[in-house]
Image (cartoon, helix red, strand yellow):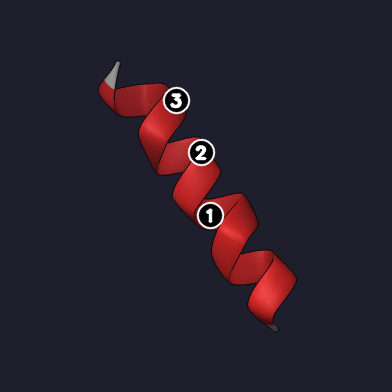
Amino acid sequence: NINSRKCFTKLFMDALS
């Protein structure tokens, strides 16, 4: 679902920071 993908992307970007 779109929402879980959006959440995953947020976490992924957070990890890159």
The disc label shown at residue 2, or none: none
**Contact flag, marks 1 and 2 (Cβ < 8 Å):** yes
Q: Is residue 13 left or right of residue 15?
A: left
Q: Height in image: 8 above or below 4?
A: below
Q: Height in image: 4 above or below 12?
A: above
What residue is rendered at 52% in x and 42% in y? 8
SS class, disc 3:
helix
SS class, disc 2:
helix
Tell me if mark 2 has few (under 14), some (14-19) or many (20+) residues whose alpha carbon lies within 10 angstroms of its own: few
Q: CA distance from mark 2 to mark 3?
A: 5 Å
What residue is rendered at 27% in x and 25% in y? 2
What residue is rendered at 37% in x and 25% in y? 3
Q: Amino acid at mark 1?
A: Lys
Q: Which residue reaches farthest top?
A: 1
Q: Amino acid at mark 2?
A: Cys
Q: CA distance from mark 1 to mark 2?
A: 5 Å
Q: Amino acid at mark 3?
A: Ser
| Residue designated by label 2 | 7
**Contact flag, marks 2 and 3 (Cβ < 8 Å):** yes
The disc label shown at residue 10, or none: 1
| Residue designated by label 3 | 4
Q: Position of residue 10 (x, y in %)?
A: 53, 54
Q: Is residue 10 left or right of residue 17?
A: left
**In which quadrant of the rendered image does the C terminus lie?**
bottom right
Q: CA distance from mark 3 to mark 1?
A: 10 Å
